[in-house]
Amino acid sequence: MTDKTTIAAISTPMGTGGVGIIRISGEKAMEITDKVFKAFSGNALVSSEGYKAHFGRIFDGETAVDEAICLVFKAPHSYTGENVVEINCHGGVFIMKKILRLVLSNGASPAAPGEFTKRAFLNGKMDLSKAEGVMSLISAQGEQGANAAYNLLEGSLSRKINEINSSLLSVAAHMAAWVDYPDDEIEEIDDTNLRNTVQTALIEINTLLSRFDSGMAVTTGVEAAIVGKPNVGKSTLMNLLTGYDRSIVTAVEGTTRDVVEETVNLNGCILRLSDTAGMRETGDLVEKIGVDRSRKKLERAAVIFAVFDISRELSDEDIELIEMCKGKTVIPIINKTDLDRKADISIIENNFGKCVAISAKDGDGYDELCETVTTLIGTKNFDTTAAMLANERQRLCCENASASLKEALDAMDFGLTLDAIGVCIDGAIAALLELTGQKASEAVVDEVFRQFCVGK
Amino acid sequence: MEYFAKKYQVIVIGAGHAGIEAGLAAARLGCETCVFTINLDWVGNMACNPSIGGTSKGHLVREIDALGGEMGKAADANTLQSRILNLGKGPAVHSLRAQIDRRLYSDHMKHVLELQENLDLRQAEITDLHQLDDGTWQVKTHLEAVYTADCVILATGTFLAGKVYVGDVSYESGPDGMFPANKLAVALKNMGLPTRRFKTGTPSRVNRRSVDFSKLEIQEGDENIVTFSFDCNCEVKNKLPCYVTYTNLETKDIILKNLHRSPLYGGKIDGKGPRYCPSIEDKIVRFAEKERHQIFIEPCGENTEEMYLQGLSSSLPEDVQLKFIHSIPGLENAETMRTAYAIEYDCVDPLALKASLEFNDYSGLFGAGQFNGSSGYEEAAAQGLVAGINAAHKILGKEPLILERSGSYIGTLIDDLVTKGCSDPYRMMTSRSEYRLLLRQDNADHRLTPIGYEIGLISEKRYQKYLKKLELIDIEKKRVQNLVISPGEEINKLLVSRETSPLNTGVRFAELLKRPQLNYELLTPFDKERPALPYEVFEQVEIDIKYEGYIKRQQAQVDEMHRLEVKKLPEDTDYNSIHGLRLEAREKLSKIRPHNIGQASRISGVSPSDISVLLIYLEKECKK
């Protein structure tokens, strides 16, 4: 199978490593890179004979962004069997994202989970025996990507997108009802109203897009949750992890009072860390909501810091927590080593391996914990770009929606009939719905019957 | 006593709109076919509204015609009034609708079936159906005759375990007082078909003599009539008009006071009703703020005084119906001839079907029409045609006909049914097609006639006529692209009066046609050399030029999707053994068994990474 699109992604872990690589694969890899990269030699990458390194600078329009080395591999002599360019740049998160963004806005699409490997297989760069491995890889990365997308979908950004979408759905449904039920008394589409709705949606989407660029809507890193029953010292651990290190990237005010989120950098590993409400059965409604949210966090987190109090015997709640964490990537932590050891931790170690002993209060065991985290994340090969990917996809969807709405406005200005305008609006809705997997035509049809009294 | 009557290649159960097309297609493709109906006097009965077409339904009829089906021709031959709906809203949504003489339509269709070579038409209730060990199917009639066939097409409409409700009265019945098919319903259930209950309804009919027309708005047909069939040889004229009236607060009051007597609100009916075809009580409850609802009064035929009250479908008791009808202007003294009723019936979950409309689990058994969960004559006929073709193809050893959703409303309809299923009776709408700028009623022949010809349902003569039209379009398009119009007082006067910019330099005629404010007709004085061509040719050229950019954009989406549609998934794929598929995807894929990757990608619960996994699996299988 030959896929016509050219894809791009950051192919090194998102940390603060020295060098970052952005990989671009597809027929137009060189062509696209040429739009953002100028070699000091003055030679374009499209004329490169392949297997060559080119030194130069990355440009955003007229502004130089970074110095970079581009490695050019010509089809079929590359990892994927297609034309491939690898941009080696400085490894900061901001720079890498910025360069990827430039590449994407010049014609590349964000790579889907496992897509480089998939292409490598489909282009015969791997033998048959590897097929199953590739399939599991795609499946696993897809799952991570989906979780990451889900995270984003719950935030304020997605609320905004839903808001825009519902105003568009409402006009699309009106148009559909007006067209599909010409005999019913459907109010005529008012041109000014239609234009206003489309224009407002366009402005809001463009505002979102500009916010993406300033990084406000972007969060990256490995999703990690601190969990444990009440009073085992979760918040103290949170303070230890965030306070000790000065490289706090952002402090996001949680949407709820009960889950506090911080982005922290532990020896170059970026974690999106949430401190959750203590897990216990409770009759109190507010607390119950908090506990439910903690459970959700626990389900979604890529890494779990499970905290146990060594100074008390393990309770049913601890055992329940162990059950809940089974099958996940868990760092078991026994806290309060400054007090007497009363708990029998064998059941914890049987499930999750050796515990990290700390005293969050006075900082003992911090180094050991950092080391455990970095080894785990290093060896587990976390796809830290999952959230980034979901985010880039969201941005791309917004961009497609923006283009469709622009087209709708142009069609209106030109004086075209509503069928053409309607198709453009549907296109915008489809782009906005892409992340939730809903189909535009179904959403519109459902909305018609909700809003309008139509039919014989 | 049971006796063996005859062996056929195809047996169609039901002679409604689906059964007719199914039977005709199979017979025309050379299969010995028998169509069974419970009542031979109502072949192709319009049990509800006396009209064919309408938004997106008109598209379906034209597509059926382009493929070589019968509905369009029969409708043209029996039209009482014809209108194009949605004029001014754009060519993609222009829709043809015709009021039809119900009795004549039925007689017409019956006669077409009777005259059809290879086809027998028989009145009998089919009471049993099962598959024999050698794979052939056996049906039994209520008179104990046994027939066998290679393929059976179920087109049972609302007859299957039909039950009629009028207020607190209910009884087992098919539509219009005909017998229900109860034994067949049991037989299908015993076979293990996933059946369920849907419901639909129809309004009252009143006597024309009792209507006060002085209080009604009249609705006339179009002056220039466009026919459904691309191959129509008859002259179509408007014969009878329709009328419009409205319900009022009194109607609302009567209905609300008696709501508890409705079986729908009283909870007696479990069947899922169509959302787009609400009863008057539904409309009044759900849209409480509306003071009035529009009612159309439509003629049922030239030889009858019956008039159909579109918009008054109801399952309230008869006495309540009479009361609320009499509250409506023009109907104060209306004499009801037939009472509105709701009907509940068995149908199948269409997810059990392939895109060919054959059952996944029963080789040689097909479903079509309301039986598949759809609603509407046109939707039924479209499926009947496809089921008939595919039954014949199976017998002839040919590949099944699967129309892509990007190429037709018929393809969209079937893809929706077999991929997404339906939770209420499925009605076609233009908004259901993401490719609607391409799927216009005016170009249905362009999209489907070559397919109909290849199948063998379009004659050589008709195909040549179609090719000629294409050639003319092509020549005319080239002509307008080369023709230069020079600026001048006359043309600029026209342009300014149409609120579009005047010319400074010469422009191509095609460029002028692109402007939405202009059309062929307006530009006639500046196009002296224009050849005399049929209207349809100018229409195509103008639409192609005006919507070029949008058409190209949709075509690009189609091409993108097509890459996935050509990747076939073998029928015997064992999804449970494919490494890497998520559990939900395995379950859905095993149930729906998509015929290609494109269809798989439209199944809810199948993620993009599942699709990647499937692509690799396919590659692996073919490398083996």
Image (cartoon, grey):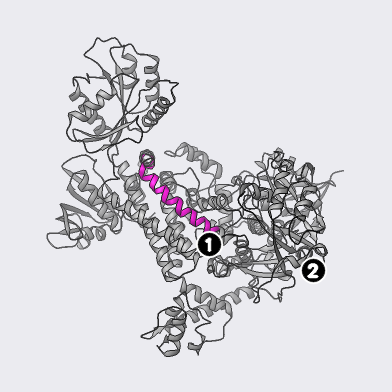
Whole-percent x, y for residue A103 in the image: 26, 55
Q: Is residue A159 magenta?
A: yes
Q: Is residue B461 magenta?
A: no
Whichever of callouts 2 and 1 sits on the residue coming sooner in the sequence is 2
Q: Is residue B363 left or right of residue B40?
A: left
For the view shown, which residue lies furthest in the right direction?
B1
Residue at point 50%, 76% (across, down): B542
Whole-percent x, y for residue B546 in the image: 46, 73
For the view shown, which residue lies furthest in the left direction?
A40
Q: Nearer the viewer, residue B382 or A85?
A: B382
User: Which structural element holds mark 1?
Assistant: loop
The C terminus of chain A: image quadrant: bottom right
Q: Which residue is mark 1?
A: B407
Q: Nearer the viewer, mark 2 or mark 1?
A: 2
Q: Which residue is mark 2?
A: B302
Which range is magenta?
A149-176
- Asked if residue B522 can be seen in this view, the reply is yes
